[in-house]
Amino acid sequence: MVSRMPLTLRAYRLITAMATPIADLALNRRLKKGKELAPRMAERRGESKIARPDGPLVWLHGASVGEIISILPLIERIRARDITVLVTSGTVTAAELAERRLPPGVIHQFAPLDLPQFVARFLDHWRPNLALFVESDLWPNLIMASGERDIPLILVNGRMSERSFNRWRFAPRAIRALLSRFDLCLAQSAEDAARYAGLGAPRYVTTGNLKLDVPAPPADASTLWALQAAIGARPVIAATSTHPGEEIALVDVHRKLKHTFPGLLTILVPRHPERGPGIAGIARGAGLKFAERARGELPDRSTEIYIADSLGELGVIYRLAPIVFIGGSLVEHGGQNPIEAAKLGAAILHGPHVWNFAEVYSALDLAGGAEMVADAGKLTARIDAWLKDGEARGRVAQTGLKAMEALTGALERTVAALDPYLIQFRLSGEGAKRGQER
């Protein structure tokens, strides 16, 4: 396999191998920025304090929070077959989510840095029987080393944006070599499948988006009650998963609407909670009174901007706000996930940049379950109209919920595609058991 590896991947492997001595410096720098957890730094070097359980083990790897949430129902289906599941991710927020939401018995580890020595140590310890990579987190050393060990690789909930597709076209031999290691690519949409095919994936199937089959996010009852009591009957709007530049626009929207709607509360939920203090500075500079959730504060009667710089509470926010702007879409990020908001009955607004979830936004917009706004001015006008017309807002929310229901089914199609591998584990286990009995 190594001899047939393209020059670009051989160079990548050599350079990353040479970088191993400085890996600790990089990890310590990330630790200071809050991007690593000190007690679990060894996992980034491929080490683990957890012994590998006996029997078959399925390894699922997803980059961050969104990917981990999307595979929760799939994990439950695999665990129901008495197969050990190992989940890896690369961010602190995903690790914290895994601690709260993974089913009992599922192991979570930080993914090793993509350095050959660390990857080898990780694979030597866990010896997965099947590896499922989620969406688009394609680390070359992880993929190449797994292929060299004959570990079956499957891409699940695969996503390939047009932007990523065009970038990979500048390294055609590298991406073809990586995709050739996968037994199967299960794509979210026909467009994604076509892009994988165009880049050299030998086998691909359109199974749909697993995020559409994930239940609506839960909400801690005591947290929800406390916030409902603090807010009372005030009009509420929310902007979730926001990125730099969008909070300025939302603060401006609030300033324009607050006199028309006395008591208006705007909840801002940044995509990265550590940006909370910076958003507080924006509100302060605009002369608006604000409160910060990360400081343990609840909104009071004078609070105009509530900065929900916390983790895992979107289920609470979507139950509080009847109108939700989904961030990452007024700026050129590609848009964040609108599915959870739609499932909890929010009327959704978004900007024009939504290629990360193009199929979902297209379905919502065409059905009338969401609306695109090109800029802050149009966002202000639409929120104004929906705050005045609760019936129209309610129709949009109901339409969005029905649009999401029509797109489900990815979980069943994904499990069906994985069945030949999962059944083989059972047959192997039964054969070993019969051999022991004899």
Image (cartoon, rainbow, N blue to C red):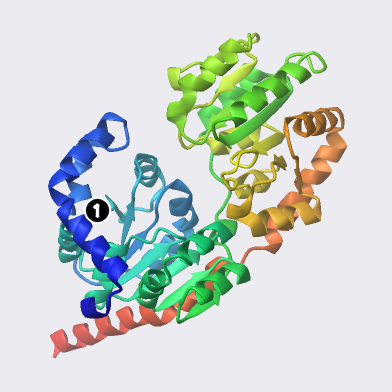
Q: Residue at x 48, y 67 (%)?
A: 169
Residue 121 location, quadrant: bottom left
Assess disc 1: are there few (<14), some (14-19) or many (≥20) residues with their C-alpha within 10 Å of its C-alpha: many
Where residue 302 appears, as percent x and y from the top left, is 64, 8
Looking at the rendered structure, the secondary structure element under dot 1 is loop
Count of marks, rendered view: 1
Where residue 282 appears, as percent x and y from the top left, is 57, 17
The quadrant of the picture occupied by the C terminus is bottom left
The quadrant of the picture occupied by the N terminus is bottom left
Where residue 204 appears, as percent x and y from the top left, is 50, 77
Circle 1 sits on which residue? 112
Question: Is residue 349 depicted above or below 175 in this figure?
Answer: above
Front one among 399 and 144: 144
Q: Is residue 244 left or right of residue 30?
A: right
Residue 57 visible to an observer of this rendering: no
Q: Residue at x 65, y 46 (%)?
A: 353
Front one among 361 and 11: 11
